[in-house]
């Protein structure tokens, strides 16, 4: 099975850190929002009754812990206004950094700036995620298969939307050339959502078992750019763009490695989904644990604030 690659690289310990653990600064400011830690609840579900309760849980936890949160695709709520309440989470998270979400491919199926604005307004979001998921759409029988000519349409959204546009994958990574093109047309940041975590080829296999099509899905089980390798690749883009690490992050040490590879935030989807299913306290415990793990890694590497992380804190990058 494909892995993120984080297990192949190691943080280099600093045996005599000139630091007081309690004074390590894990906070940052992004899109004018203050975060207590560089942690993101990655985009997941919404648009159903259970999705409403789930989004509320996640939003309350994001507010309490001072972290960022993305919602899942808002397409269902754009098509059926009644579902928009399931995304009305700003009331639970008045200060949190919140990201709206739509599939970029919808720009080829009748969506434009109005739908993007609606998605942002639904949760008074600070930014909009457009997700790119060509393989997922190709593996879905009902998927939208026309990805042609999307770049200029994404450019138009970047020009007209009052909040920044970010682009993410859903678990297979974003190649160097595409990331560069997206940033050139005005995208404010890239969330790699790389391989090694949630595999949509597998999810689709369980969602709609079909012996003939399952063989096709199985062939893509190991698809994608491993998350750590993807982060390393995107370091080569000039101008230090905003990069978000996600896709199979397991803990605060993976998060610390992501920051050393140049990411500003680290996102977790499946891990927080499992915790939220147990309950709100478990979710908050998980977030706090990741934060403490990351802070401990900072202490043990002699890093006193997030901006100090850099590639020299890692060994083994040639193995990625
Ligand atoms: C239940 C579930 C629903 C998801 N729904 C969306 C979605 O609607 N939009 C999106 O951009 N990504 C979606 N994702 C992808 C995640 O945001 C993330 O990129 C991916 O799961 C990799 O992270 P992970 O390995 O931590 O799960 C979903 C993931 C999960 C587990």
Image (tube, grey):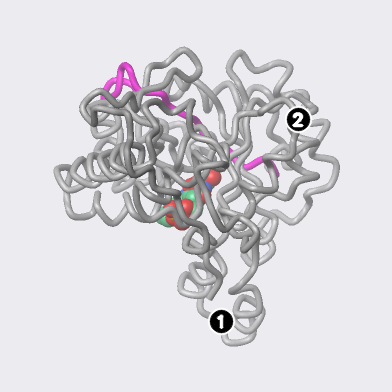
Where residue 93 appears, as percent x and y from the top left, is 29, 23
Q: How many marks?
A: 2
Furthest-bottom residue in view?
211
Where residue 264 appears, as percent x and y from the top left, is 51, 32
Where residue 243 appears, as percent x and y from the top left, is 59, 35
Magenta-tinted stretch: 90-105
Residue 157 appears in which quarter of the rendering? top right
Give the SS element for disc 1.
Answer: loop
Q: Is residue 232 above or below residue 305?
A: below
Q: Residue at x 57, y 41 (%)?
A: 311
Residue 139 appears in which quarter of the rendering? bottom right
Q: Quadrant of the C terminus?
A: bottom right
- Direction from residue 87 to residue 179 in the image, left or right: right
Give the SS element for disc 2.
Answer: loop
Q: Nearer the viewer, mark 1 or mark 2?
A: 2
- Direction from residue 229 to residue 68 in the image, left or right: left
**Is 295 part of what is drawn in magenta?**
no
Residues packed near mark 2 inside 10 Å, few (<14), some (14 to 19) or many (20 plus): few
Taking depth in this image into account, of 23 and 178 the one nearest to the observer is 23
Q: Which mark is residue 82?
A: none
Residues packed near mark 1 inside 10 Å, few (<14), some (14 to 19) or many (20 plus): few
Q: How much space separates mark 1 and mark 2, taking CA atoms?
A: 45 Å
Taking depth in this image into account, of 183 and 27 the one nearest to the observer is 27
Furthest-front residue in view?
16
- State yes or no: Cβ of the residue under disc 2 lies below 8 Å from any atom of ligand 1: no
Q: Answer yes or no: is residue 132 visible.
A: yes
Q: Is residue 32 above or below residue 142?
A: above
Q: Mark 1 = which residue? A: 210
**Is 104 part of what is drawn in magenta?**
yes
Q: Answer yes or no: is residue 52 visible.
A: no
Q: Mark 2 = which residue? A: 238
Where residue 239 appears, as percent x and y from the top left, is 72, 25
């Amino acid at each position: 099975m494909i892995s993120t690659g984080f297990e192949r690289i190691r943080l280099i310990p600093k045996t005599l850190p000139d630091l007081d653990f309690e004074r390590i600064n894990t906070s940052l400011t992004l899109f004018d929002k203050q975060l207590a830690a560089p942690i993101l609840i990655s985009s997941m579900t919404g648009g159903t009754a259970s999705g409403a309760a789930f989004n509320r849980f996640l939003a309350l936890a994001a507010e309490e812990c001072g972290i960022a949160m993305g919602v899942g695709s808002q397409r269902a709520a754009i098509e059926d206004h009644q579902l928009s309440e399931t995304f009305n989470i700003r009331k639970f998270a008045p200060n949190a950094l919140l990201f709206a979400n739509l599939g970029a491919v919808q720009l080829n199926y009748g969506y434009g700036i109005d739908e993007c604005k609606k998605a942002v307004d639904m949760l008074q979001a600070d930014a909009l995620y457009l997700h790119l998921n060509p393989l997922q759409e190709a593996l879905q029988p009902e998927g939208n298969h026309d990805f042609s000519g999307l770049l200029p349409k994404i450019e138009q959204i970047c020009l007209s939307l009052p909040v920044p546009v970010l682009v993410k994958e859903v678990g297979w990574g974003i190649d160097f050339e595409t990331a560069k093109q997206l940033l050139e047309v005005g995208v404010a940041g890239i969330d790699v959502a790389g391989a090694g975590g949630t595999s949509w080829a597998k999810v689709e296999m369980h969602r709609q078992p079909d012996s003939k099509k399952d063989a096709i899905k199985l062939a893509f089980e190991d698809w994608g750019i491993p998350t750590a390798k993807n982060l390393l690749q995107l370091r080569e883009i000039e101008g230090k763009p905003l990069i978000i690490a996600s896709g199979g992050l397991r803990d605060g040490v993976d998060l610390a490695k992501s920051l050393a590879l140049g990411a500003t935030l680290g996102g977790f989807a499946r891990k927080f989904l499992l915790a939220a299913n147990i309950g709100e306290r478990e979710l908050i415990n998980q977030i706090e644990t990741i934060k403490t793990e990351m802070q401990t890694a900072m202490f043990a590497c002699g890093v006193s604030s997030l901006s100090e992380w850099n590639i020299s804190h890692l060994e083994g990058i040639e193995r990625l």
